[in-house]
Image (cartoon, rainbow, N blue to C red):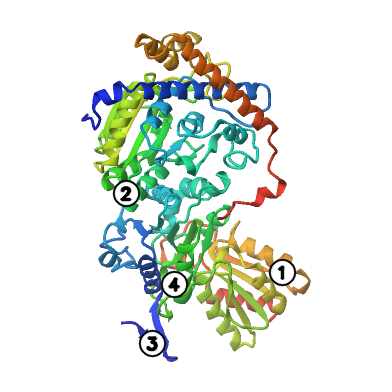
Amino acid sequence: MTSATQPGEVLNDVALWLRMYTNMVAVRLFETQVNELYTRALMPGLAHLYIGEEAVAVGVCEALERSDYITSTHRGHGHCLAKGASPDRMFAELLGKEAGYCKGKGGSMHIADPATGNLGANAIVCGSAGIATGAAFSAKHLGTGRVSVCFFGEGALGQGILYEVMNLAELFKLPVIYVCENNLYTEYTHYSETTAGDILSRATAFGLLAATVDGQDVRAVYEAAHILIERARSGVGPGFLLCNTYRYHGHHVGDINREYYRSKKEEQRWKNERDPIANFAKWLMDQKVADKTKLDAIEAEFADEMRKAVEFAVAAPYPVHREVGEDVYA
Amino acid sequence: MPETNAAGQRELTFAQAIREALAEEMRRDKTVCIMGEDVAEAGTPFKVLSGLLEEFGKERVLDTPISEAGFTGLAVGAAMTGMRPVVDIMFGDFITLTMDQMVNQAAKIHYMSGGAWKVPMVMRTTLGATRRSAAQHSQSLHAWFCHVPGLKVVLPSTPYDAKGLLKAAIRDENPVVFFEDKMMYKLKGAVPEGDYTVPLGAADVKRVGEDITLVATSSMVQVALGAATLLEEIGISAEVVDPRTLWPLDEKTLIESAKKTSRAIVLDEGYERYGVTAELASVIATGAFYDLDAPVKRMGAMHVPIPFSPPLEDATVPTEQTVFEAARTLCGR
């Protein structure tokens, strides 16, 4: 892979490191609050937590401009936050309130926000692959210089449309990056039971530039994403980034008894040894970029912000009844 | 060269009217582009788009792989971000391959996002049997889209309507599915030069009558007009009403006509069972209840896969003769 970036520029940017650390902490604290809301029965519907995978969303979105596009998934809170969504309106949406990003009409799985280039989270697995590719088509056609990123889990590798649009993206040389988050489990089934052959080859077969990274290492994710994104932006063509990661919680919050598809020991091993935030904190301290006091202060600040955001959302009003028939047609 | 009719009006075929609408919109708005299978050099197998590549180039008239879901999804994303794509789905039977993109994505994005995003795209596709193309190239599946909130569904029946409705569809801020009867591409009719639109949601009375209303869509409009001529010979005056768009639906015009004539037959080439005719009949039965002298009659395609053998295929769809017989019976003659 040829790098569009000077290594030193990426690897020695202290402000960037701290921003990525902060954003990962913010995502985890947000999701911790979601879990809390759900278990306190304050949140209707489903919640698919992103805890454990924070380095992927944060590393990729850090390499994007605010005006660049993303599409997200049912496990999308991390992507939306990393792209710049504010926690209070996120929580409001999760609770079905008028102040939410979608006036409460979308909920947890459909956060969308034009101001941050978020084309929407999507509850159909691989449902947004076409949309992300189309946003890249617009960017090229209109000459905006924007790039589009399609986040999806490894479960989406089973959907045919992914291969249709990767083919189209390469044919049309579109500035789109397909980011596959392999968290090992397609709902309740290990991905090895659903995925034949080699994942990366599926992208390289179409001519996409593809790379694999440790999805628990935010610096590695950022660096690989940065290279693919800037290559796409320059018009060379689309890319594919496979991020190996792990979700700490169940497929959704209600998925408590998971021993039939994965062991507690396995979960504990990932949490103890592969945690993207703890490992990055240790690295930051080793590099003398920040001490424990500073990192603790970041966490305390965001814990407070998340609590306030939840309070805002809980107190916010529901949409008025007539809203049910609004926004069906533009 | 365009022909002129007896009244001195310019005449175009249905296909030429579609092409003119696209060309005019592409000249007017640089964000309008066309994509689909064999739309560029080939101009589609029906030759509807011939000449557009030469004028607008391959950046705006894009041949795609045979990936209906993929390029439809691409159009959804492009529409959200500043383009006005027109996708071409060669045979209406192939819409089945696009259903997630149209039903779960295009139709819902505006609502799910609380109005934040919109999807101004058009899907052009075809309907209609009797082309001897068998079960996978002959269906009229427009009812599928009518069932989904967030989509608009347009069924032109004349060259004039085709041009005006397509221009309105392209300018609409919503996903619009535009069904063309592939048997009608050579149908000629008066089409004005230059810009005009036909609004979505306005029915048109194609023939004024007094004794019975024939509500007909797309391919069935010509059938209804033919039946009306036969009915006239036995002294029955039939009114033919074309809704032109199934959603939005001009309920008022349908109901007013049925109130006036007191009898109605609803004709549509989609499957009769659970089909468009059921919805339109319900609208009329409810809205004109106290003025009806007979139950509303429905006529659509038989509930069978479209067969290949010509005499079998012809038996699956309403004809002038079957509509004539049904109308005569309904009028007690």
Q: What chain letter is assigned to the residue under label 1?
A: B
Q: Nearer the viewer, mark 1 or mark 3?
A: 3
Q: Quadrant of the N terminus of chain A?
A: top left
| Residue found 54% across the figure and 22% down from its top | A302
Report how far apart the C-alphas of labels 2 and 1 lie in the structure.
Answer: 56 Å
Q: Nearer the viewer, mark 3 or mark 2?
A: 2
Which residue in the protein does label 3 denote? B4
Report how far apart the C-alphas of labels 1 and 3 lie in the structure.
Answer: 43 Å
Q: Quadrant of the C terminus of chain A?
A: bottom right
Report how far apart the C-alphas of labels 1 and 4 lie in the structure.
Answer: 35 Å
Whether the residues at callouts 2 and 1 have beta carbons within 8 Å, the answer is no
Q: Earlier in the sequence, mark 1 or mark 3?
A: 3
Which residue in the protein does label 4 denote? B163
Which residue in the protein does label 1 denote? B295
SS at mark 2 in the image: helix
Whether the residues at callouts 4 and 3 have beta carbons within 8 Å, the answer is no
Is residue B259 visible in this depiction of the protein?
yes
